[in-house]
Amino acid sequence: MSEPVLLFGADYSVYVRICRIVLAEKGVDYTLHPVDIFADGGPPGSYLELNPFGRIPSFRHGTFELYETDAITAYVNEAFDGPDLMPSDIRARARARQIMRLADTEVYKHLVWGVYVPWKDKGVLPGLGRAGLILGELQRLAGENWLAGGQVSLADAHVYPMLTYFSMVPEGAAKLAQFPRLALWMEQMRELNSVVFSRFSEEKSGAGSL
Ligand SMILES: N[C@@H](CCC(=O)N[C@@H](CS)C(=O)NCC(=O)O)C(=O)O
């Protein structure tokens, strides 16, 4: 499949970064087409033809268009050569999917929007809420080396950008350190080229913006 691959979104976005990590792990050449959802007046009207909800990312491969990150990453994993980013074992695959949904429903909602965003936007830390529960559960579910087993999977790509923002909050980093296997996994992730190449600007500059 040599049709061009385009990813639409912004490099500050958790969900865009998930796709970028997956594309890089698969070795897929792609162009990141910038779409800023926080621009005055929102994203350009033409973007709504790709995603009528105005959320990022969206994806195009040739003429095939998709939005929703889990659909994009599953498609990329299946449509391109490169390592299979879902475990072959049925139960490990189920675990990967469980972890990804947990990331969407708990990590993104409570640790990114509930902790990082108010801290960054208003300098307010509303409390860590259910961080202990969420991190404990992630650590309990995690495999030996990577989240869903012996190899990097879509689950690793899904969780890492979210926990990166959480760990930019000093109290978040301290909380994460209480879960040593998870903290070790974060360190391991940080070394991957796919993760280095998709770094948030705050990781490079120390500033803060979602
Ligand atoms: N369920 C969507 C969530 C994507 C999402 O929430 N993206 C954020 C940026 S990280 C966004 O576009 N937010 C703007 C909005 O919700 O209006 C997916 O998996 O792609």
Image: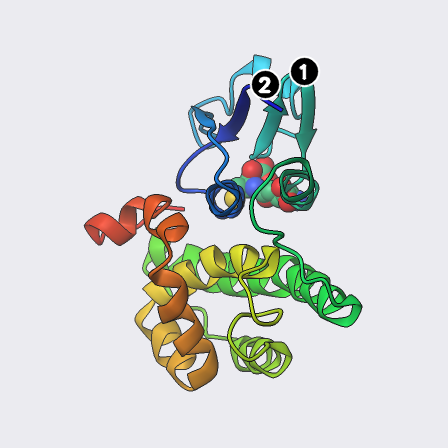
Identify the residue shown where x is 46% and y is 82%.
181
Across and down, in percent, residue 19 comes to 54, 42
Label 2 secondary element: loop
Identify the residue shown where x is 43% and y is 55%.
117
Pick the residue in front: 188 or 128: 188
In this orientation, does residue 179 appear?
no
> Tag 1: residue type?
Thr
> Tag 2: residue type?
Glu
User: Label 2, label 1: how many angstroms apart (C-alpha)?
Assistant: 9 Å
Q: Which mark is residue 9?
A: none
Q: Which mark is residue 3?
A: 2
Pick the residue in front: 4 or 198: 4
The residue at the far top in this view is: 46
Label 1 secondary element: loop
Across and down, in percent, residue 114 comes to 51, 62
88 with respect to 41 (left or right) = right
Identify the residue shown where x is 46% and y is 42%.
24
Across and down, in percent, residue 200 comes to 34, 47
Kindly indicate whether the residue at mark 1 contacts the one at mark 2 (C-beta within 8 angstroms). yes
Q: Which residue is mark 1?
A: 63
**Quarter of the picture for ligand 1?**
top right
